[in-house]
Amino acid sequence: MDFLKIFKRSQLSFGLACVAALALMFISEGSYWQSVGTLDKLDAMATARTRVQDLLQNILDAETGQRGYLLTGRKEYLQPYEQALRKFDESFEFLNLHYGGKPESQELLGQMRALTQTKMAGLAQTINLYDEGKGEEAIKIVSSGLGKNQMDAIRALSTNLQNHEISSFLEGKQKIDQTLMFSRLGVAALTAISLLALSMYLRQAAALIKYELELKRIGQARRDQLEIEVIQRTAQLIELTYHLQTAREDERNRLARNLHDDLGSLLTAAKLDAARIKPRLAGSAPETLELLAHLVGTLNSSIALGRRIIEDLRPSALGNLGLVATLEILAQEFAEHSGVEVHCALEPARLNAAAELMVYRLVQEAITNITKYARARQVWITLTTHDGQVAVSVQDDGVGFDTAVPSSSAYGLMGMRYRVQAEGGVLNVASTRGAGTLIQANLPESKPGTFEHM
């Protein structure tokens, strides 16, 4: 929708909306900062009340500790007294700052400080007399009632200070109530103005709604058509990938059979011929026997190489030993060749031959990518089943990569994804630079009676 056209048709409604928005922002910000300031003051008042109560409690604790010491003579009873001495200065310092602009409260605080010092001096005097061996004199001072009079005066001053704080608190609360009421009235008025502007805008924009709906209908039809084409192309790609992978596996099987039948027979025959020649050359020159031994070793290496190539082309263990054993062999060989520590957690899974081969190829390609790019020290391979789903994952602690940036291995991951989708599964790839990579495929278990091995 063209904003300039709407603005030209609805200048008055936009003007009202802008004025309402600015006024609402002004009222909201003003109310907010005024409330914040009042709440800060209320918080300071609550803290001051707590400090006054703490002062009174510290004095009581100190007096209790003094009497316990005078009665028992045990030093541990003086701990509350000593703690009170350390807390007094901190509390009075805070209260002096808090009551700086309140002469009446500051005067009460000064009287309370003087009484507190007198009270603490009396406690210290009795403790000193007891330490000097004049316990009876100390007890007489305690029993004289002077300390009770001092405590009553301190309590009265504490009550007065707290009453002042309560009065200030009520005033602050009343200010907040007034601010909130003003804010409510302002918001209500501005809401009415905004509704008026909205109604004007809706009338002005009514003519453009049909046009917008028509554009949406055309755009939606085009998107639906594109989505259908994307779904069709994706299905074609999956079918093509499945066909190409099946053709490649068939070609691998044919090549493996040829290598096994033809090349294997030739190398085995050559090895047998060499074995027959060796006894006949027993009396010959040592150089000839050494060359023959080298030839036998070369033939052995060639036979082993041929077996590895055949096994890579067609994993015979998959049909003979099953998926779990084949993955364990693959992981062991990878660990031996690369020096990477591999952890396997493999459970038997019900999969048909095509799905087992797909899982094997997925793990094989994943560890190939780890060898090329990951620079990992550890790899975890898991195969689990749960609620009719088979989950296979390969995780490493390598350098990782940014999944949003195309890389040289993107086509390999794309091929994995299409192969998994061809078996009715889903492939997820999670990776972060410096945090390794996780490749996980989830596919449905095969139904009983569909297991056919190669």
Image: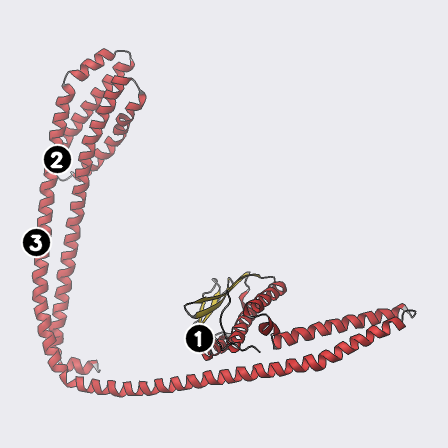
Q: Secondary structure at mark 2?
A: helix
Q: Secondary structure at mark 3?
A: helix
Q: Give coordinates of residue 191: x percent, y percent.
A: 10, 68
Residue lying furthest right in this view? 283
Q: Amino acid at mark 3?
A: Gln
> In the shown orientation, is residue 164 left or right of residue 261?
left
Q: Earlier in the sequence, mark 2 or mark 1?
A: 2
Residue that numbered label 1 is attached to: 425
Q: Amino acid at mark 1?
A: Gly
Residue lying furthest front in this view? 449
Residue that numbered label 3 is attached to: 178
> In the shown orientation, is residue 20 left or right of residue 285?
left
Mark 2–mark 1 distance (CA, rounded to whole Å)? 75 Å
Q: Amino acid at mark 2?
A: Leu
* Mark toward the viewer: 2 or 1: 1
Q: Please rate how many residues cluster around mark 1, counting C-alpha atoms within 10 Å: few if below 14, some from 14 to 19, many from 20.
A: some
Of the numbered discs in the image, which one, if any, rests on residue 99?
none
Q: Secondary structure at mark 1?
A: loop
- Residue 54 placement: quadrant: top left
Residue 408 seen in this snapshot: no
Say which residue appears at 82% left-offset and 76% top-offset: 273
Image quarter hosting the C terminus: bottom right
- Residue 129 placement: quadrant: top left
Q: Give coordinates of residue 75: x percent, y percent.
A: 31, 21
The answer to the question of whether label 1 and label 3 lie on touching residues, with beta carbons closer than 8 A, is no
Mark 1–mark 3 distance (CA, rounded to whole Å)? 64 Å
